[in-house]
Amino acid sequence: MKKLTGIRMMAERLGVSTATISRALHPDTCHTVKEGRRREIIELADKLRYRPNPGARMLQKGLNPTVCVLIPRQEGVFFSEFYGRILGGVIHAVEGTKWEVGISTVNMEGKNALDEFRRIRIGSSAIIYAGRPLTAAQVDELSGYHSPAVLLSSSLPPDYPAENTGCHVLGVDNFSGAISAVNYMVEFRHTRIGVILGPSDSRDFAERERGYREGLARAGIELKESMFFNGSYDHESGRVGCEYFMAQEPRPTALICASDSIAFGAMDQAKEQGITCPRDLSIIGFDDGPWATACSPKLTTVRQPLQKLADRALALLTSSMMSSEANHRERIFLATSLNVRESTSLAKG
């Protein structure tokens, strides 16, 4: 007897028709299947890692397989430098392939992550989650998700072990990147180094803070809490943080900022106070988006390799989609690099 596979296998297991299975798994017809039955079908499809045959879909509907990128449902998200670079990177990564990119804005607050992923997966072959940070409980829920998915490490809670997740985890090595920024300032004889931090409930910023502290400790620089300023991730935090440090006596000769946006704010505030960067104050950012070379002076910053991240995400998902036996729980953290430009110089004296 021929072994049942795909839709026929699911229909046999659940005691329903193949037509019911097809309707439940298609975004245009899923509403015609009762909610309880639809949920049951979607759950089984996920557990079996079932996906429509790409060739059959193209023949029937003229469609290509879709990788769905999930980003936050918030005002201005499409103008965000980070999310813009992520989306642009994924779109570039699929050029010349059979895959298409779908974009969905999500608000996961109070939601069951497993249910949301299974719902979204109906209309896509794989998911890249680049949304707001999930709770530990939500990440735990995803241990029951069996279809191809990549979680950006920035979406994990700060202290959640990446090895405990049920999906691919992909990110950048924020910790080592922050250490490289400290090392560079120390090499340029800076010893009074102020640090402007982003929110500690963000995994990225928490990792950068740990890196800054570790780098300063390795250099033998006393970790005075007065040399750390906690703010948000934006331009205004840079302005307020710079004003805080410039009021100190003696004031820092260098500032390390947890994002480029913070660094831009610090540069603007320093200029307003008549402090010349980099002659009087060296500044380093973290991101290396397109504005880093558009400002004056051009910003020295730690580069996040977001295009490489997007390329690697697609490679992981392609591997998972091609074989149900492929490892779908890889943990990959890409190296950062320090791009030295005009906003840093040798310390005076």
Image (spheres, helix red, strand yellow):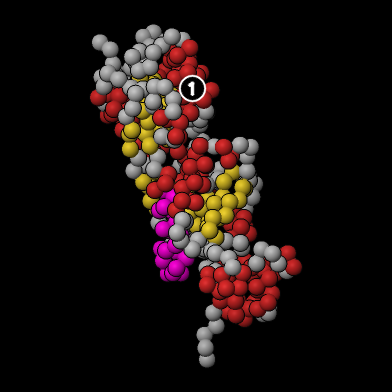
Question: In x, y percent, where is residue 314?
Answer: 45, 56
Give the quadrant of the C terminus: top left
Q: Which picture quadrant has residue 114?
A: bottom right
| Residue 209 visible, this orientation | no
Q: Residue 44 colored magenta?
A: no
* Residue 179 as seen in the image, left or right of residue 265: left
- Outermost residue toward the bottom in this view: 1
What x and y, as percent, mark residue 268?
A: 47, 18
Please check the rendered image and state whether residue 311 is part of the magenta-colored stretch, yes or no. Answer: yes
Q: Residue at x 52, y 42 (%)?
A: 83
User: In the picture shown, does residue 137 fall above or below 53?
Assistant: above
Residue occupying the point 63% across, 37% down:
75
Magenta stretch, overall SS? helix
| Image position of 44 (left or right of 323) | right
Tell me which corner region of the image, top left, top right, bottom left or bottom right, holds residue 313: bottom left
Q: Of 294 and 264, which appears nearest the observer?
A: 294
Q: Of 81 and 31, which appears nearest the observer?
A: 81
Dot 1 lies on which element?
A: helix
What are the residue bounds of the magenta stretch? 309-327
The front one of 171 and 287 is 287
> Mark 1 = which residue?
265
Q: What x and y, as percent, mark residue 105? A: 61, 47
In the rendered view, tell whether residue 203 sits above or below residue 263: below
Three-letter amino acid code of the residue under disc 1: Gly
Other residues around mark 1 within 10 Å, as few (<14) / some (14–19) / many (≥20): many
Number of numbered discs overlaid on the protein picture: 1
Residue at left 35%, top 40%? 336
